Image: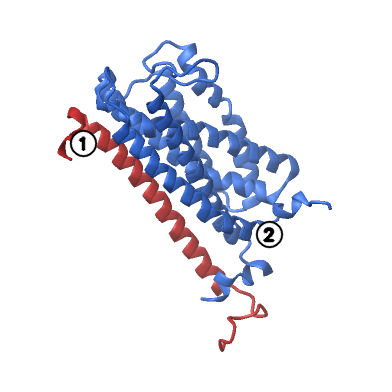
Amino acid sequence: MSLNWFKYASPATFYPLAGKMIPWFYGAAALLAVFGLYVGLIVAPTDFQQGDAYRIIFIHVPAAWMSMFLYVVMACWSALALGFNTRLSAMMAQAIAPTGAVMTFVALWTGAFWGRPTWGTYWAWDARMTSELILLFLYLGIIALRNAIDDPRRADRACGVLALTGVVNIPIIYFSVHWWNTLHQGSSVSMTKAPAMAAIMLTGMLIMSFAAWFYAIAASLARVRTIMLERERGAAWVGELTEVRNA
Amino acid sequence: MNAFFAMNGYGFYVWCAYGVAALTLAIELFALRSRRRAVLEEARLTRPDDAPGPAGAAE
């Protein structure tokens, strides 16, 4: 049996597949979020140094991780689109940008409300915070650039080039707390050493991270379906969809 | 319950963070839904005439 991997690279076949997957991803995100919030807001004890303000990290850290991760995923789809001129890759890149911007905004906002009681300020031009703000501008710039170009295929290429250029910012964000000794503290969780936080707090943060993952996947898939309809609304497969036929 | 919302004096910061995060996601979901509805409406209007219509319905 030969499996045709490229079958789902066509919008006509990917559209119904994504439609079947979205409720499961939203459902998983909702369940994990309820469980994660229960652990984070009720089970986990008050931090002995930061008081209850630390509970903001249960959304701050997952959102910050997702903001960087989604950018890398978006850039990979852009690279595929630029290299192979594949329609679906460009649409995926387009679909991820707004969710990435949402995650970046949430990371910045919750960071500010954590920083005020903990560091004494909502904002500082610290390396980590400034590079994360640049990430927000990159996402918004990519969205604005797309809206400024009428031809979708030209917009794909322009946004792809901008997205790939902006990847340089991701290691800057990630390593900023090591490279520059400014306000933002180093990571409590890293790939190279044991987490510097209580197990129950780490558990809550990881559950919330999985919830953020599933939410981002669901939202991106929902958006890519809309983008497919926007770009291909004259195509026969769109005219044959039940949701289009049954007005 | 009041103690829970007070967060030992950090309630303002905690709930501003959680509230705006929830609001941001709600706005994203709402925007997604309206965008989908708009494009479906447009696809219905621009549907080619030879495409099969609703089953059993007079066109």
Q: For mark 1, what is the residue? A: B4
Q: Position of residue A179 (x, y in %)?
A: 49, 12
From this view, report whether residue A151 is shown above or below residue A165: below
Report which residue position mark 2 lands on.
A13
Judge whether residue A122 can be spotted in this image: no
| Residue displayed at 59% across by 83% down | B55
Q: Say if A83 sits above or below A28 in the image.
A: above
Under circle 1, the secondary element is helix
Between A206 and A150, which is closer to the camera in this rendering? A206
Q: Identify the residue at image location x=43%, y=47%.
A: A31
**Residue type (three-letter) at the residue carrying disc 2:** Thr
Letter of the red chain: B
Amino acid type at circle 1 is Phe
**Label 1 in the same subunit as label 2:** no
Binning the other alpha carbons within 10 Å of mark 2 as few (below 14), some (14 to 19) or many (20 upward) gives few
Q: How many marks?
A: 2
Q: How is the image coloured?
A: by chain
Residue at the spot x=68%, y=69% of the render? Answer: A236
Residue A94 picture location, percent across and down: 57, 46
Q: Where is residue A92 in the image (x, y as percent from the top left)?
A: 60, 47
Instruction: Select label 1 or label 2 by which is in front.
Output: 1
Which chain did the image draw in blue? Answer: A
Q: Which of A39 and B27 is in front in this view?
A: A39
Q: Mark 2 lies on which chain?
A: A
Label 1 to label 2, Cα distance in Å? Answer: 49 Å
Q: Residue furthest right?
A: A1
Question: Which residue is painted at 64% across and 72% down in the image?
Answer: A240
